[in-house]
Image (cartoon, rainbow, N blue to C red):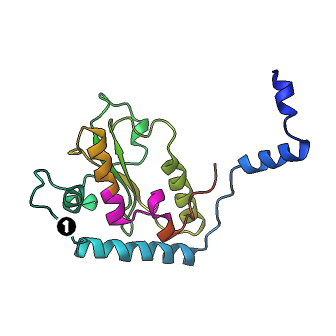
Amino acid sequence: MTSENQLRLFTAAEQRTLYRVRQPTEALEMSGTALQEWKQRVFQYQQQVQISPPPQQVSLFDLAPAPMQVATAIEPFTLPQQNTEFWRWKAEDQGVAALYFVIDYALPILLYVGETVKSGQRWKGEHDCKRYLLNYRQAHYQNQLESMLGIAFWAQAPEQTRPRQQLESALIAQWRSPFNKENWEFWGTPFVGGK
């Protein structure tokens, strides 16, 4: 079957509908007040996490600590800060297995938690969080508000993928980082749109 015949599977109207669906959504215009209120809600929640971490259920039979036990010991805001454009710089090595945290240090709030097998290369390709950060930065610029975006790596993450992902999930649940899809129901998705 030729590609010309394949196009005839859909009517012209259906093709236009399919095309519209694939168009990127416009970035949501957010007022300065709405942006500050959104950030304040995230900040207040995360401050409670820092003051009193969520209770942990432990087992007498576990030899290794559970992911949530390890997660509560990690303090993202105290890790060394790096520029979010770190991946553009020439690095001598590819990095190590790590967890990383995207933070707006101006308030401060933890925006995203991720994991990688090679910390020096994680963001070199496509990554949705790059778009969220661009939209977040743009909303601040449009409203003449301060943001100070950075990224921090925790290089003691397990080298094995599954334990590292379990720890990542525990941290996402603990901090309710708003750019992680798992937490969109709590904070909405004001920065997801755009290209």
Magenta run includes residue 149: no
Judge whether residue 152 can be spotted in this image.
no
Residue 194, percent across and down? 64, 53
Outermost residue to the right: 12
Left/right placement of residue 70 relative to residue 38 reads left
Left/right placement of residue 113 relative to residue 191 reads left
Magenta run includes residue 176: yes
Mark 1, other Cα within 10 Å: few <14 / some 14–19 / many ≥20 = few
Judge whether residue 90 can be spotted in this image.
yes
- Return the residue nearer the eye: 162 or 130: 162
Left/right placement of residue 30 relative to residue 106 reads right
Question: On the image, numbered disc 1 is attached to which residue?
Answer: 57
Residue 122, percent across and down? 40, 39
| Residue at x 58% of width, y 69% of height | 143
| Residue at x 30% of width, y 39% of height | 161
**In which quadrant of the rendered image does the N terminus lie?**
top right
Image quarter of residue 101: bottom left
Outermost residue to the top: 2
Residue 69, percent across and down? 19, 60
Number of marks in the rendered image: 1
Residue 89, percent across and down? 39, 35
Q: Amino acid at mark 1?
A: Gln
The secondary element bearing badge 1 is classed as loop
Q: Main secondary structure of the magenta part?
A: helix
The magenta segment is 170-184
The answer to whether residue 184 is above or below residue 82 is below
- Return the residue nearer the eye: 36 or 53: 53
